[in-house]
Image (tube, helix red, strand yellow):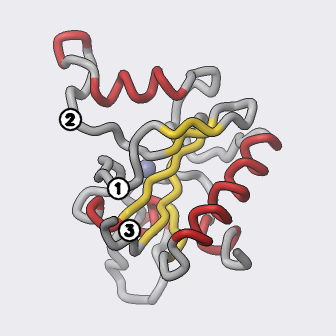
Amino acid sequence: MRKIKYIVVHCTAGNQQQKAKDVVYFHTGPKSKGCYGWSAPGYHYIIEADGTVVNTWPEEKISNGVKGHNSECINICWIGGYGSVDNRTTAQKHALINLVKTLKAKYPNAEVRGHRDFSVDKNGNGIIDPWERIKDCPCFDAITEYKHI
Ligand SMILES: [Zn+2]
């Protein structure tokens, strides 16, 4: 197994009724069909609106979630997120906690972060200010929310 340094939380920032397979298809399907055409999907786990957790890629393989860090990440993603609005369902919140707990048990040294926490602290004040974020993904503060896990 590769060394896992980060468990990274994402959102799709799209239609919450999408299914995990739709997201995987969008990442790995042919460019001619408007997909990204990647050789690996963006996430290892995707959490659907009803809380179903789908394992979309083997953990030992690298997914395409965080540019420049993927070799040391497990990427997990909840379906939804409207602009910067956190519209996680209760089922998704529970499923996320359970998944983070399971992964932390497996990779105890891994740090739980949101995608946006990989942004650069441009003014050096020690925090990623909203204006410094690459994007709002995953629409909530994952570091704070999961720090007790
Ligand atoms: Zn993301």
Question: As drawn, which residue projects farthest toward the bottom?
Answer: 125
Q: Position of residue 107 (x, y in %)?
A: 51, 73
Q: Nearer the viewer, mark 2 or mark 3?
A: 2
Is label 2 in a helix, a strand or a loop?
Answer: loop
The residue shown at (27%, 20%) is: 29
Amino acid type for the residue under numbered disc 1: Glu
> Looking at the image, is mark 3 or mark 1 earlier in the sequence?
1
Q: Is residue 81 visible?
A: no
Determine contact: label 2, label 3, CB under 8 Å. Answer: no
Q: Which residue is mark 1?
A: 60
- 61 or 126, nearer to the observer: 61
- Answer left or right for 98 relative to 106: right
* Residue density around tag 2, few if under 14, some if 14–19, many if 20 or more, within 10 Å: few
Q: Position of residue 116 (x, y in %)?
A: 45, 61
Is label 1 in a helix, a strand or a loop?
Answer: loop
Q: Which mark is residue 39?
A: 2
